[in-house]
Amino acid sequence: MPAKARGVLERIRTDKVEFVDLQIIDMVGKLNHVTVPSYNMTEEALSGGLPKLDGSSLRGFKEIFESDMVILPDQSTYALIPWQTSKGYRTARMLSFVMEAGGKKHFSRDSRFMAQNAETYLRGRGFDRSYWGPELEFFIFDGAEWETNPRQREMGSFYRIRSREVESPQQYSFRPKEGYYPSEPHDTLMDVRNEITRVMHDNFGTHVEAHHHEVAGEGQCEINVMYDTLLSQADKLATLKYAVKNVAANAGMVATMMPKPIFGDNGSGLHVHASLWRGQNNAFYDSGDKYAELSQTGRYFVGGLLNHSRSLAAIVAPTTNSYKRLVPGFEAPIFIAWSKGNRSANVRVPAYFNGKQAAKRVEFRTPDPSCNQYLAFSAMLMAGLDGITRKMDPGDPVDEDIYKLTQVRRRELGVKELPRDLMDATDSLQSDNAYLKPLFESDLIDWIIEYGRAQHREVASRPTPREFYLYFDL
């Protein structure tokens, strides 16, 4: 028996695990699982022999005539699930790869496998590794309700969100856009975030840098984890989303990664920080650069992100709701530009520290938490590397509040806009995807485009309550 498998099986015995949860990621980034009794966890199972998978039942995987697949556990992701153990079921989890029938070949659309390939591709381009640091924003509510017309159940008639920060008997509530960094008792979600942080550290081995209440007035939170390499960080983010939802549920609440659940207040972003390294040297750092201590390599990486921002949007902001976040007035980036500390640009070079090589990175502000982070990080990497290969000049930084600039002034500065909706984003991806081709197969790009367009039509073709308000009396 291989030493690695022997080690995991020994941990299962030592931890007295009764069940093992094997978790996989579908194409839209949703976590799925199958649970195996621990007595069935053998060397064969750890080698991809158990359990089987119907690939036609997961979004973006297989057609019904070719659906047989198997699951390969990633033993490095073994961890105990605390909320299962607290219920009396000692359960461990392992994130897993999806394999073709026979278990010998990786499924090309498995996004974890793609993230692994992205790291291999990076090394082939002369870099040793990349570091990624996402800032996860999300909402936690006491509850959410929506109803549908009984004769046309697809049409939403109304929704209502219950938030303790609005309905608390102490009336400790926030006005819209005034929820940033409040102390207790106004911050009623500190205990929930503390528990998420404890679980991430004690059970999943993830170091959280900090957590806080975010800007939106009702239930918006942010948790930041320590930077890590691409696949490992994508795994940590998948685990963080998993922990957020389960800890909230166990507290009698509900968490959502929906980018814009509340009209008239800030939405949730997923600001992603990235850097490329050769050995001990940060390829983005140049102490001689007077503007942002950003190297020429870093500038070309920024140029790639800017040049491909519109097509990247279809991957990093992949829902119709994403574009309700990307509107003026709520700190969301709608303009394609870069700057040192300017949050109205969609690419920033954070300026918190000077003269510190380890801290130099590029921040991409377009993504939101509804994305599949494995695909998002991989696509961002490919865009940045394309910028480095083709020496894409990002142009001059824009150090003005872009929201307040006239259209003429924006044109003078070369500032373009992100897509207005998901259809616009998928059109951009259709016309600009060559930079993804070394990693993303053409059929996957086609699926992303068609799935996005189907979502757009799903929403755009149905009457909404707001349309009744505006037009019923015409």
Image: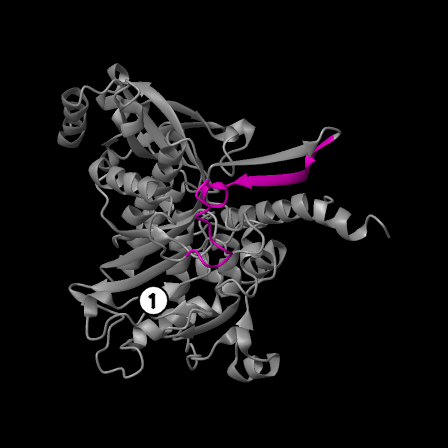
Q: Is residue 175 magenta?
A: yes
| Residue sitting nearer the eye, 27 or 369 | 369
* Tally of numbered tags: 1
At x 33% / y 34%, what residue is drawn? 96
Image quarter of the N terminus: top left
**Going by the image, does 174 lie left or right of 451?**
left
Residue 430 seen: yes
| Residue sitting nearer the eye, 260 or 242 | 260
**Going by the image, does 3 lie left or right of 22?**
left
Q: Is residue 329 magenta?
A: no
Residue at the limit of the structure toward the front, as seen here: 170
Residue at the limit of the structure toward the right, as seen here: 474
**Going by the image, does 163 lie left or right of 363?**
right
Task: Please identify the quarter of the rendering in which residue 147 is found.
Answer: top right
| Residue sitting nearer the eye, 430 or 365 | 365
Vertical comparison of 105 with 426: above or below = above
Task: Please identify the quarter of the rendering in which residue 19 is found.
Answer: top left
Q: Which residues are magenta?
A: 152-179
| Colouring chosen for the image of the structure | one colour
Instruction: Please provide percent x and percent y for residue 214.
Output: 40, 54
Q: Are there few (<14), some (14-19), or many (20+) residues within 10 Å of tag 1?
A: many
Instruction: Please provide percent x and percent y for residue 337.
Output: 47, 73
Instruction: Please provide percent x and percent y for residue 168.
Output: 46, 41
Instruction: Please name the residue that numbered disc 1 is placed on.
Output: 362
Vertical comparison of 171 with 364: above or below = above
Q: Residue type at mark 1: give it.
A: Val
Vertical comparison of 173 with 144: above or below = below
Vertical comparison of 306 with 12: above or below = below
Instruction: Please provide percent x and percent y for residue 296.
Output: 31, 77
Residue 163 seen: no
**Under tag 1, what secondary structure?**
strand
